[in-house]
Image (cartoon, helix red, strand yellow):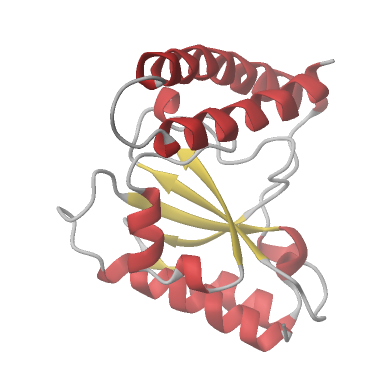
C-alpha cells in the first residue's frame, strides 16, 4: 500500500477511537501507538503496526493475545477491514517490548489526536516522535515481566480449554485463545533463552 494511504488508515483509526461510545465495549482503548515501518522513510508498506492500549489489567492482555471483545472492537473501528497488525497492551505496563520498538503515540483518550506524530509520519520524519530506546537492563526486565504474565495466562487459558473441551457449544473461542497465548509465550521464551 502507498505511504499516504497507510497514514490515512492510521489517522482514520485514531479518529474512530475518539468517536466510540464509552459503554459499548467490555474494555476501552485508551491509547493508539504506531511502530515499525511507518516510522521509517516513506515507501510502500504491507501492514500498519499498531499497539492498542486498553484499560484492562496486565493479566488480561498477555503478549500476542486479544482481550475478550477485541474482534467486536476491531469490526466497529474497521481495524479488521484494513491492513493493520494490532498488538493489544495494558495501560498498567509499558507499551514497548522486544517487538514494539520505540513506538510513537498517535492518539490518547486523555489528549485526543497527536497531530505532531501524524505530520511527522506523513513527512517521513517519524524518527523525531519516537520514544527513546530502553537500556538493555530495562528491556531485559520488561521481557521477564511479560514472560511471567504470559506463563500465568497460558496456565489459565489451558485450564479454560480443558474445562470446555467436551462441553456443548463452540470450542473455537477457547482454542483460539490457547493458540494466541501459546504463540506469545513461545515468542517470549525464545527471547528469554
Q: Quadrant of residue 117?
A: bottom right
- Residue at 43%, 30% (x, y): give it: 174
Write down the quadrant of residue 58 in the picture: top left
The residue nearer to you, when weighing 45 against 72, is 72
- Quadrant placement of the N terminus: bottom right
Between 69 and 111, the residue placed more toward the observer is 69
Residue 115 versus residue 181 in the image, above or below: below
Vertical placement of 17 versus 138: above or below?
A: below
Residue 11 picture location, percent across and down: 49, 77
Looking at the rendered structure, the number of numbered marks drawn on it comes to: 0
Task: State left or right for residue 167 relative to residue 63.
Answer: left
Name the image quarter holding residue 5.
bottom right
Question: Is residue 97 shown above or below 185?
Answer: below
Q: Is residue 132 left or right of residue 28?
A: right
Residue at image position (81%, 24%) is: 191
Residue 47 appears in the picture as rendered: yes
Q: State left or right for residue 111 relative to residue 106.
A: left
Name, please, the residue furthest toward the left. 23
The answer to which of 17 and 70 lies nearer the viewer is 70
User: Relative to 99, is 64 on the left or the right?
Assistant: left
Q: Residue at x 57, y 75 (%)?
A: 118
| Residue pictured at 55% horizontal, 56% vertical | 33
Q: Quadrant of the C terminus?
A: top right
Percent x, y for residue 190?
81, 23
From the top left corner, tell me how far across and down residue 45 is, in percent.
77, 74
Residue 147 higher or lower than 99, as above or below: above
The location of residue 170, given as percent across then percent down, is 35, 37
Q: Is residue 114 visible?
A: no
Amino acid at each position: 500500500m502507498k505511504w499516504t494511504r497507510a497514514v490515512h488508515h492510521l489517522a482514520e483509526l485514531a479518529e474512530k477511537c475518539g468517536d466510540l461510545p464509552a459503554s459499548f465495549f467490555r474494555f476501552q482503548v485508551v491509547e493508539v501507538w504506531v511502530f515499525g515501518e511507518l516510522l521509517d522513510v516513506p515507501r510502500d508498506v504491507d501492514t500498519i503496526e499498531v499497539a492498542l492500549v486498553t484499560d484492562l489489567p496486565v493479566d488480561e492482555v498477555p503478549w500476542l493475545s486479544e482481550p475478550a471483545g477485541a474482534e467486536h472492537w476491531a469490526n466497529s473501528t474497521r481495524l479488521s477491514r484494513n491492513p493493520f497488525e494490532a498488538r493489544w497492551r495494558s495501560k498498567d505496563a509499558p507499551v514497548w517490548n522486544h517487538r514494539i520498538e520505540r513506538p510513537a503515540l498517535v492518539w490518547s483518550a486523555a489528549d485526543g489526536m497527536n497531530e505532531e506524530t501524524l505530520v511527522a509520519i506523513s513527512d517521513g520524519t517519524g524518527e523525531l516522535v519516537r520514544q527513546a530506546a530502553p537500556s538493555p537492563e530495562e528491556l531485559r526486565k520488561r521481557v521477564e515481566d511479560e514472560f511471567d504474565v504470559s506463563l500465568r495466562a497460558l496456565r489459565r487459558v489451558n485450564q479454560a480449554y480443558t474445562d470446555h473441551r467436551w462441553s456443548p457449544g463452540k470450542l473455537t473461542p477457547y482454542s483460539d485463545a490457547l493458540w494466541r497465548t501459546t504463540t506469545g509465550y513461545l515468542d517470549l521464551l525464545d527471547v528469554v533463552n
